[in-house]
Structure formats: structure tokens, C-alpha cells
Amino acid sequence: MRPDAAREAVIVLVSSGFAAFGCSTPVVDLADANGGVTQGLVLVERSGVAGAAPQTNVSAKFMRLPAASDADLAERVVGSPFDRPSVGACLQLGGAVEEPISSLSGTGPIELLDVGDVTVRAGESPMPLAARAFPDVGDLVFGVFYTSRDAASELPAPARYAFDSSGSTLLDRFSFDAEAPAGPEDVRIGDFDLADEPLIEEGAGAEVTWRAFDHAAEVDRVYIDVIASSGAAVRCGFRDTGHALIPASVMKEQSRGEGTTAVTIAVRRVREMPFAVSGVDLGEIRFDFSVIGRARLVSR
């Protein structure tokens, strides 16, 4: 659930509750008396080339921002954006586009909170996260965020991930856990395994299959990125049913250009869910597990 949607849902539920009991007490928004909202975003990324061991990166940001701020813009400014096409649709990814930082100046600064020591546990061994200073963006964004100490970390999937904070003067200590999905498995393009550099006819659609799990189809989404040699990328969204068809129009667009003979295919299983801890008004954890391969384009 996106932060704005979560905020609206809480307001609607509270409003409905007061109406049901005939109460005239004003509805209390998530913002505190100072008009601020604390938003937590935890991201677990697990990625690997098809046929090779994946690597996992964990990051966590706890933002204090004015209630009037654009939550999606704030997420992009602090470096945690994720473009989501709707199911059955595709969109062109913009790449590293400079966000309009100046648009934040009218609402006030974003502070990335120090929440003490943060540890992730998935399996037997805990993994402490490193606190890092966020590069100051004028007086608009400042503070610390948390990331994996080792970029080569490997954490299991599926698994239950537990997150613990020792707390600080800015936020009480907290703990929460979330169930991570499995990464994409048995991914095939047509009759070929993704690891075997499958063949795709130029200008034709591409049939993609993977191992699906019945219980995950409703909560997980699968996104397939098609990346041209130029770096231009298109992302298509699907339900996690084990089958998808990348439209011929996408493959045609990505195969344009003299000498283009291959594209990169990234199949991502994404699970997003809210978390609730004391002191955090809007909490979201996102698991983004992907497998990457290359496909060769051949003439009909």
C-alpha cells in the first residue's frame, strides 16, 4: 500500500467509526500537533543472474516529513523509488531522472531519523545494518539511513525476516517481522530456460513462465523488465500466476537500433506490505526479488 493510500484508509476508518457511534469528536489525522508524519520504508532486494547465487541488499529509511509533503516525491528524493505499472500494462522507465527537489521547499525539510542499531534476522545469524549519513540536499533532506554492510550478503527466501531497532532519542525501540516470498524460479522464455540465453523473434511477443505459488498470487506481483543494449527499459506488470506475455510492441521497441541483437530480461517478484510500530505513522516493507538473464533476438 502506498503511503498516501494508507493515510487515506486510516482517515476513512476513523471517520466511519465516529459516524457509527454518533460521535462529534474531530477526526485525528496521522500528523502530530506539529503537522509532521513519520514514514518508515524497508527494502529487501535479492537479485542474481539466472543460474547463479543471488545477493541480498537491505536498506531502511525512517523519514520525518511535513504532513503536506508529497510522499511519493519524498520517496524518490531519498532514493527508494519503484515504478509500478498496473496489471496487464507496461511503462517506459525513466532511468536516473533528477527529481524536482525545489518542490519540497514549500512544505519543509525531510529528516532521516537515527533509530539506533538496526538488525535483520532471517535464519540463524543476525545481520547488523550500517548507519550512513545521507548526502545533504541543501536544507531540505538530511540525516541517516541504514544499509547492508556487505553488498555480497545472501539471505534466504522464502523466509521470515525479523527487524529490530535499539531505539534512540528520536524513536522508541521496535521490532517487527514479515514473511518474504520465494524468488522467481524455473523462469523460461518460450521453450528455453532464462539461463540459456533464449531466442526471441524480433518484433514478436515473448511468453514468460515461472513457478507460481497459489497462496501468493493475490498478494505478490511480478514485474518483467526488458532492457535494450542502449539502457532503455520497459517494465510490464502481471499477477503472480506463473505465466505472462510481453507484448510484441514492447519487444519491437526494445529491439530497435542498428546492431541490436540481444536484450536483458529481469523477472521480479515484488511483495509490499505495511508494518506497524510505535512512533511510525506509515510503515511499508518491500521485498523485491529478481532473476536476470539475456535473450537473443533472431529474425523470423
Image (cartoon, rainbow, N blue to C red):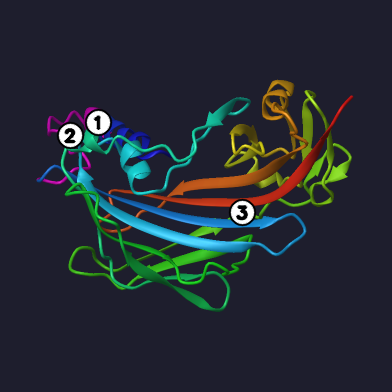
Judged from this view, the residue extending furthest toward the top is 249
- Residue 181's disc is 3
- Disc 2 element: loop
- Disc 1 element: helix
281 or 134, nearer to the observer: 134
Which residue bears the numbered disc 2?
Answer: 27
Q: Position of residue 108 (x, y in %)?
A: 15, 42
Figure quadrant of the C terminus = top right
What residue type is disc 2 on? Val
What is the crowding at mark 1: few (fewer than 14 residues within 10 Å), some, or many (at least 20)?
Answer: some
What is the crowding at mark 2: few (fewer than 14 residues within 10 Å), some, or many (at least 20)?
Answer: some
Q: Main secondary structure of the magenta part?
A: loop
Examine the rendered structure and indicate whether residue 152 appears above or below residue 27. Answer: below
Q: Position of residue 265 (x, y in %)?
A: 70, 42
Of the image marks 1 and 3, the number of the one nearer the N terminus: 1
Task: Give the extent of the magenta segment.
Answer: 17-33
- Disc 3 element: loop
Q: Position of residue 205 (x, y in %)?
A: 77, 26
